Image (spheres, helix red, strand yellow):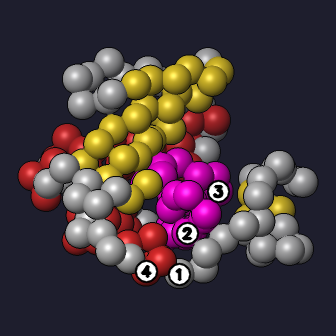
Amino acid sequence: MWKCSKCARTFANRNQTHTCARLGDLDAHFEGRESRPLFDAFAEAVRACGRVDILPEKTRIAFHVRMSFAQITPRNTYLLGHFVFARRIEHPRFRKIETMSARNHVHHFRIDSMHDIDDELRGWIAEAYAVGEQRHLVK
């Protein structure tokens, strides 16, 4: 693991391109917004997978193990987000899928209510978490 000397964020690769702009405080993302309880429930589901760094950045909140595997962008009453998977998953809950490489597929989603944080979403969180640990590269 490589750690940036400016922002102290860790990366799987040395000198990985990134921005050091971090808010350092989750609360700033939720000022005047009602979506904090949804975020807290999502973050709790992620933490159930294991150790995770939650990184508030300028426009999003990243979830990071060896690499970032999910992100959330808070809106007033809902959350926008994405997962990184090693495979493409066609499902109506994914609003858009971007294929970056053979083992890097970004799946965009929206969380409108606590009901959206169900067993299906928890399964995807666990799969994305494994990608964050880079377990898909060990095969």
Closer-to-camera residue (124/130): 124
Position in image of residue 114 (x %, y %): 13, 58
Q: Earlier in the sequence, mark 4 or mark 2?
A: 4
- Say whether marks 1 and 4 touch (CB < 8 Å): yes
Mark 2 surroundings within 10 Å by alpha-carbon count, few (fewer than 14), some (14 through 19), many (20 or more): many
Q: Residue at x 60, y 65 (%)?
A: 57
Q: Earlier in the sequence, mark 3 or mark 2?
A: 2
Q: Amino acid at mark 1?
A: Asp
Q: Which dot, 3 or 2, sits closer to the camera?
A: 2
Instruction: Report the span colored magenta.
Output: 51-72
State the CA–CA distance, disc 1 to disc 2.
6 Å
Mark 3 surroundings within 10 Å by alpha-carbon count, few (fewer than 14), some (14 through 19), many (20 or more): many
Q: Earlier in the sequence, mark 1 or mark 3?
A: 1
In the displayed structure image, the side of residue 119 where residue 63 appears, left or right:
right
Numbered mark located on residue 86 in the image = none
Numbered mark located on residue 27 in the image = 4
Q: Residue at x 36, y 47 (%)?
A: 80
User: Is label 3 in a helix, a strand or a loop?
Assistant: loop
Numbered mark located on residue 56 in the image = 2
Q: Amino acid at mark 4?
A: Asp
| Numbered label tally | 4
Furthest-front residue in view?
32
State the CA–CA distance, disc 4 to disc 2.
9 Å
Q: Residue at x 44, y 23 (%)?
A: 97
Closer-to-camera residue (95/54): 95
- Say whether marks 4 and 2 touch (CB < 8 Å): no
Position in image of residue 69 (x %, y %): 52, 48
Mark 4 surroundings within 10 Å by alpha-carbon count, few (fewer than 14), some (14 through 19), many (20 or more): few
Q: Amino acid at mark 3?
A: Arg
Which residue is the site of mark 3? 66
Numbered mark located on residue 25 in the image = 1
State the CA–CA distance, disc 1 to disc 3.
21 Å
